[in-house]
Amino acid sequence: MKLSQKLYLERKNKNLTKQALAKELNELSGFSNYFKKEITLLESKQKAFTYRIVDDIAKYFNMTIYQFLTKQWKSYNTEEITLIDNNIEEYFHGYSERMPKTFKNLSDIIHKFDLVNHDDWVAIPKYDLIMREYYDYLYRDVSKESSSIIIRRAKGLLDNLDLFSSYNHENDLQFPINLETDFAGYTKFNDKREPINMNILIQNIEFSLGEIRQLFEDDYFDYDEEDTKYFNLLNYYREKLDIRFEDIEKDLGISSAEYRKWEKGEIDPSISNIIKICDYLNINIDLLSSSSLRTLNNINSQSVGSYILQNTNIHDSEELSKDYYFSERQSVILIPKYCYEYMFYYLEDKTHKDIGIKKAIQFTREFFVKWYEFNKARQFLFYSLTGVVAKENFIHYTEKEIKRYLGDSYYPENPVKFLTQLTLDRVENYGYKDKKQIINRIKQIDIERVLKSPEKTNLRPEVN
């Protein structure tokens, strides 16, 4: 989609004339003087888009440069965006009195809910699973029990799990997005039945936050500096990678004399040349714009509807309702569907045999404790995440992302490490940071050295 078409659509969506848009751009631009004729030339492809023009346009329309450059047709469906926004607002009002009165922005719901693709995840009521099923069927020491007793108990667990996880999202009457929540109650921080050490989990999450922040603080240092110019940042990233002017001329065919003028702010290069330079420096173009960085870190820079349409493959609210649902992070435990199915059929298979049922019970116990810890960790992590990291992790991970770091396992040995890898991988996938640096950091996380290990020996604290 051409930039000229995008400029036209953005202007029409705001019901602006060319002269009115030129006036608005002049009020925020520190570089250019805009006129009605210039807007006409840009929209008719008679004038090339330079970096400064694109930066001004993106800033005015409350986007990052990257969002403006990559925005597709479906994201201009303003009627559908408004419909999704209105239905989400009405839907949550009927759901809970604890929620805000309006849902114009993502931050209104992002700390309480996940947007989940039902093809990838199974949702189970957290309270029922941990406070009832876990303690009724899984916590016991099975080493001294007979196989017949264990099998009878396993069948009872399977019956309840089958009931819990058999939601048919498409047939629910909720609109536009179904909601999975556990009305039985929440697992509290100080609950005596809590199967994991919450203090250790919180300490480990603090480490995870440190890893995430360390990656972004260096490159987002100028977030609050209103007067930071792109050419200063261009110079910063080139010198950071120890790239010479001669290297740019040799590798990209851009004369070193012309490029020096870019870094001095004497020439406003074409947007295509800046994209070429950013690819060469292996950075996202938003890192050159202080206004884009502010928008990127502003979790309320988009409405809920526009964010969902731009970050999913969904084109309308009906399709959205069929494919996704909201899951309340505090009360529902989410487990990857392919992992859940393996656990379920593995345990079911062993109930028909005398051999292997004890091992299957032990596997199932560890399976639920680890995925429970993963869900708890994600809940705590979202209390502290803001900006791009929170936004990109609001839509829950896909099976492909899970398998990338889970490998051949069906539950994470260290849920916090696993969560940290997924969080960083999601941001890396959206291109907001040097990919090599994030990939290396993900691989090098030394969880045994830094994180405290959970207490495996006490999966069932005494219950008063």
Image (tube, rainbow, N blue to C red):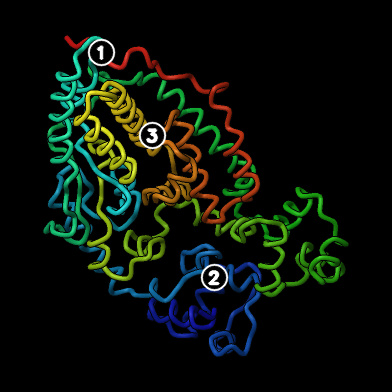
Task: Assess disc 1: are there few (<14), some (14-19) or many (≥20) residues with their C-alpha within 10 Å of its C-alpha.
Answer: few
Residue 202 screen position, x and y as percent: 41, 25
Q: Secondary structure at mark 3?
A: loop
Q: Which residue is mark 2?
A: 69
Closer to the eye: label 2 or 1: 1
User: Is residue 278 positioned above or below 386 on the image?
Assistant: below
Query: What's under tag 3, amino acid-wise?
Result: Tyr
Q: Across the whole image, how many numbered discs are drawn on residues?
A: 3
Left or right: where 266 falls relative to 233: right
Residue 141 image label: 1
Q: Residue at x 29, y 25 (%)?
A: 356
Q: Residue at x 51, y 28 (%)?
A: 207
Query: What's under tag 1, amino acid-wise?
Result: Asp
Q: Earlier in the sequence, mark 3 or mark 2?
A: 2
Image quadrant where one finds the C terminus? top left
Closer to the eye: label 3 or 2: 3
Query: What's under tag 2, amino acid-wise?
Result: Leu
Q: Which residue is mark 3?
A: 411
User: Is residue 93 positioned above or below 333 on the image?
Assistant: below
Q: Secondary structure at mark 2?
A: helix
Q: Nearer the viewer, residue 287 or 101?
A: 287
Residue 415 screen position, x and y as percent: 42, 31
